[in-house]
């Protein structure tokens, strides 16, 4: 990768093609199911037949699931942020799985693009994070987002890698024995 040739830093691009795991939504549905099961007790006090209790439980579950899907309720419960938080967690997992935190001088930078969530995350390891201004990472994200809005996602990713390479070259010039420890090709998963 040309951007890495100018630096001892490591830049890895991960593109998530499948939706990121959303455990929070699963937990909300499990809670709705649990509440529907618990409703059997109060419903049985009404001397209803078993079929009516089961129908009541199903109705309670459906109502709770629909309520959680309502935009106002999602906003009030902050469920509208789930895709971004799921993408953020996926980026953190990718950082660990690809061993970006295990480079010799802790110089790994992950550019994570979650297509389904329309979310971009940049994670820099300790050796880079303190040396590069935080605005650099925000600008990197914005380069990808702006290009994606124009239908040029690949161009945005290339520009982001070049921007990271420029920033890293200033603070982490090439050194013998450092760099090229991680994949140079984008990782698609």
Image: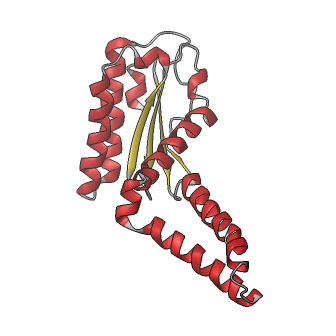
* Residue ID at (58%, 75%): 60
Q: Nearer the viewer, residue 53 or 173?
A: 53
Q: Nearer the viewer, residue 55 or 110?
A: 55
Side (left or right) of 93 relative to 52: left
x, y percentage for residue 159?
29, 39
From the viewer's perspective, is residue 151 above or below residue 161? below
Side (left or right) of 138 relative to 103: left
From the viewer's perspective, is residue 77 above or below residue 12? below
Can you see residue 21? no
Side (left or right) of 68 relative to 166: right
Residue with the most extreme right position: 50
x, y percentage for residue 4?
42, 26
Image quadrant in which you'd find residue 9: top left
Query: In which quadrant is the N terminus drawn?
Result: top left
Colouring? secondary structure
* Residue ID at (30%, 30%): 163
* Residue ID at (44%, 59%): 116
From the viewer's perspective, is residue 2 above or below residue 9? below
x, y percentage for residue 153?
33, 52
Q: Nearer the viewer, residue 14 or 20?
A: 20
x, y percentage for residue 11?
45, 30
Numbered disc total: 0
Q: Nearer the viewer, residue 45 or 83?
A: 45
* Residue ID at (60%, 65%): 32
Image quadrant in which you'd find residue 5: top left
């Amino acid at each position: 990768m040309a951007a890495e040739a100018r630096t001892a830093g490591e830049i890895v691009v991960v593109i998530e093609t499948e939706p990121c795991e959303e455990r929070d939504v699963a937990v909300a549905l499990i809670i709705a199911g649990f509440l529907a099961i618990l409703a059997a007790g109060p419903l049985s006090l009404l001397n209803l037949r078993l079929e009516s209790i089961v129908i009541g439980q199903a109705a309670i579950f459906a109502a709770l699931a629909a309520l959680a899907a309502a935009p106002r309720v999602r906003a009030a419960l902050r469920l509208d942020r789930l895709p971004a938080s799921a993408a953020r967690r996926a980026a953190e997992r990718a950082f660990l799985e690809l061993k970006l935190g295990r480079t010799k001088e802790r110089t790994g930078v992950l550019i994570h693009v979650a297509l389904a969530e329309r979310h971009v995350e940049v994670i820099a390891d300790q050796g880079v994070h303190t040396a590069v201004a935080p605005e650099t990472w925000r600008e990197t994200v914005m380069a990808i987002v702006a290009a994606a809005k124009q239908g040029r996602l690949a161009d945005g990713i290339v520009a982001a890698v070049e921007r990271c390479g420029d920033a890293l070259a200033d603070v982490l010039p090439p050194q013998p024995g450092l760099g090229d420890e991680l994949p140079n090709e984008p990782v698609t998963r």
